[in-house]
Image (spheres, rainbow, N blue to C red):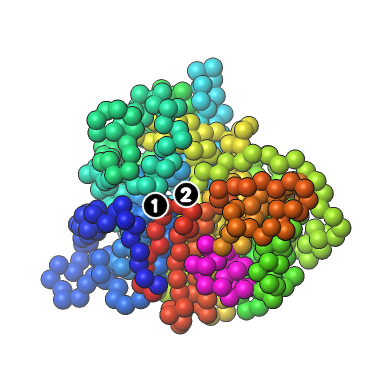
Amino acid sequence: MAVRWLRPFKRSVDGLRRQITVALLALVVAGCGSDDVELGTLGAVEGFLGGVAADEPRAAAVGRDVLSAGGTAADAVVAMYFASAVTLPSAASLGGGGVCVAFDSDKIDAKAIVFLPRGSNAVTAASDRPSAVPASVRGFVVLHARFGRLRWEQLLAPAESLARFGFPASRALASDLTPLRRALQSDPAFVRIFSSPGGEGLVAEGDPLIQVELAAVISHIRTQGAGAFYTGPLAQRLVDAVKAAGGSLTVEELRDYAPSVLETIQVPWGNEVAHFAPPPAAGGAVAAQMWALLEDRGFGRASPERRQAMLVDIGSRVMADRETWMRADGSATVDPQSLVAPSRLKDIMAGPAAGSQVRPENASAASFVAFDREGSAAACAVTLNSPFGTGRVAPGTGIVLAAAPGPGGRGAEGLGPMLIVNENIGAFHFAGAASGGIAAPSALVGVAARAMLGDVPLADAVAANRALGTADPSLVYHEAGADPALRERGGRAVAAPELGRVNAAACLRGFPPYEDRCAAVADRRGHGLATGSF
């Protein structure tokens, strides 16, 4: 698959690559006098690298270079997250949280790392915008410890370089800023960092953006380790800054935060197994149920029109079932694996779907996926529980604060990445993650089903028009170009400009050994990038 650089970034790609090369080389200890390129050096891997996809192009470039330096898929995802925390703070700030699913092809080990941004108990009268406990830094250090190979310092160096020396604001960031410019300008700390060069308004696409304070925080995490973010002087400084920004946090809450390493929800499929993040990443359970039902009911043999109808009908039933097991925080009242038990799936499809009110859900998230030359893979989605979280920056840190979960759709219920692997031979088949709130699980499974069950090229599967069934069976959302019959289904059809954004990678015949059938795709509904060696 050819690498396609987005037009607005052509001028900056060479400079970015030089920054990343310098950052990686500066941290390589061995190999100065060797004719061989050492692990951790850009270009250490020749030939097939694997691939990455992310919502922000510079983050994707960072991920690809980590693969080139010999990093694992998890290494690439860690580096892409920290780069995104700099280049796409609307959804990937250090103040937020998320969920990852990763697979180690050597150990035949798949796990979910769940680190959602939960609310603080320190809300006071002065907390006019309650914030969440920052979770991502510890989440990604756990992912790295379990599935990584390169040194932690190497993976954070590109993000620190981007923050310290700056970069032209991407279209992805500018598009997130546009609808919220007036509201965001009410915070002096936000304006000081994100103001345009002329001082009038906030940065637009192509404007230089330097974040010295954030660079200092990332430098501290890079050199002292992730624990330094949660204990010691930096932690106290962060707590004080959060309170100054009208947020809520204590040193104890920061110190005690711990991600969860969980067994995935597993759905066997022939020789493969589909792995999904379990609750409280509720989107993973929704996606798991949809995948199991689509495979069981012959999605791959259906016509294109019938496939879209199946996605709507099954999506509606699964979302209605979600109302019977999901608590307010996204956790489940039952064992997560039991949600895909044959008896439960049979009950979901029995009779008409029960009606239920459709609640608003946070559509703001950033996702990234990676697979490496050894057949390992990782997929992650992160969020601030709403666009730009609280809309405020913790003064002196450069960190955009995540909002506390709560009314009005603030939360992370839609998150839930997935992987498909052949565990018998350690072969990677599919990795995907999505944003879009209520639409995210359906969008992700729609891409996976079209590509893996329907043998549709991955790019076409991602680009296909989408329709969304909701917990209210009479209500259908659809993108332009959806089947007219769906717009007449039930009585209420609502046009939407987009229904979810999916980043995905797939090796349709499995990898290894069929790298010629591998691809990575960033959703054209956003402004991201997919790159690698295909």
Q: Residue furthest left?
A: 33
Q: Which part of the image, by quadrant, shows the C terminus? A: bottom left
Could you tell me which residue is drawn at 82 percent across and 63 percent down?
346
In the rendered structure, which disc, 2 or 1, sits on the residue that comes first in sequence? 1
* First to last magenta residue range: 447-463
C-alpha gap between disc 2 and disc 1: 8 Å
Name the residue carrying label 1.
Answer: 56
490 lies above or below 266: above
Amino acid type for the residue under numbered disc 2: Ala
202 lies above or below 281: above
Q: Is residue 374 visible?
A: yes
Q: Which part of the image, by quadrant, shows the N terminus? A: bottom left
Q: Does residue 340 appear to the left or right of 47 in the view shown?
A: right
37 lies above or below 102: below
When asked about the image quadrant of residue 483, the answer is bottom right
Nearest the camera: 459 or 288? 459
When asked about the image quadrant of residue 73, the answer is bottom left
Magenta span has 451? yes
Q: Residue 120: horizontal and vertical position, in percent?
A: 54, 31
- Cβ atoms under marks 2 and 1 closer than 8 Å: yes
Residue 366 circle label: 2
Nearest the camera: 324 or 179? 179
Q: Is residue 339 visible?
A: no
